[in-house]
Amino acid sequence: MAIKLGEVLANEKTKLTYGGGSMGLMGSMATSTYVKGSLVLGIIPRVFKENAQCGPTIGKELPIWSISKQLEIMYDIADALPYQKVLVH
């Protein structure tokens, strides 16, 4: 389903803004959107990138310092905004 959603976004010429990385459903959606020719921007907290917890970002990458800043930027610029609630222990 994530791959199909990415294809639909690309067919509609939608720019995708997501939380970065290439793992899981959001990574699959970002990959299929990018492969089909749409712009993809991954806004990723540096702590995830530095700890290699997310895989390489698809498309362009904007590393930032905090999750709150990540969400602020994503809400401001996104045409499409997938969001997955993550519980951190």
Image (tube, rainbow, N blue to C red):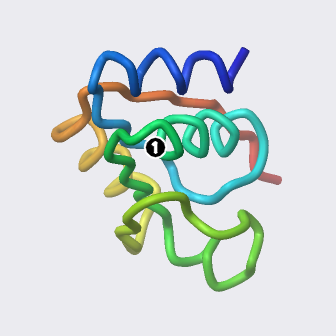
In what quadrant of the picture does the N terminus appear?
top right
Tell me: residue 52, above or below residue 4.
below
Quarter-of-image position of residue 70? bottom left
**Crowdedness of circle 1 by 10 Å Cα count: few (<14), some, many (20+)?**
many
Which percent across, then down, holds residue 64?
37, 71
Looking at this rendering, what residue extends furthest in the bottom direction?
Answer: 50
Instruction: Using residue 71 as the reference point, say whether residue 1 is left or right of it.
Output: right
Residue reaching furthest right? 89
Count of residue discs: 1
- Dot 1: what SS? strand
Residue of label 1: 18
Vertically, is 43 above or below 51? above
Picture coordinates of residue 25 (x, y %)?
73, 33
In this view, the residue farthest toward the left is 76
Q: Is residue 36 above or below residue 44?
A: above
Place of residue 20 in the rendered image (x, y in percent of width and height, measured from the top left)? 53, 56
Residue 69 place in picture, x, y as percent: 32, 57
Residue at screen point 46% across, 56% down: 67
Query: Which of the two residues, 72 or 1, is positioned nearer the viewer here?
Result: 1
What residue is shown at x 36% (from left), y 53% (from top)? 41
- Residue 6 sits in quarter: top right
Q: In the picture shown, does residue 22 fall above or below 5?
A: below
Residue closest to the eye, 53 or 69: 53
44 and 13: which is toward the camera = 13
Say which residue appears at 68% left-offset and 23% top-offset: 2
Q: Residue at x 44, y 59 (%)?
A: 59
Amino acid carrying label 1: it is Tyr
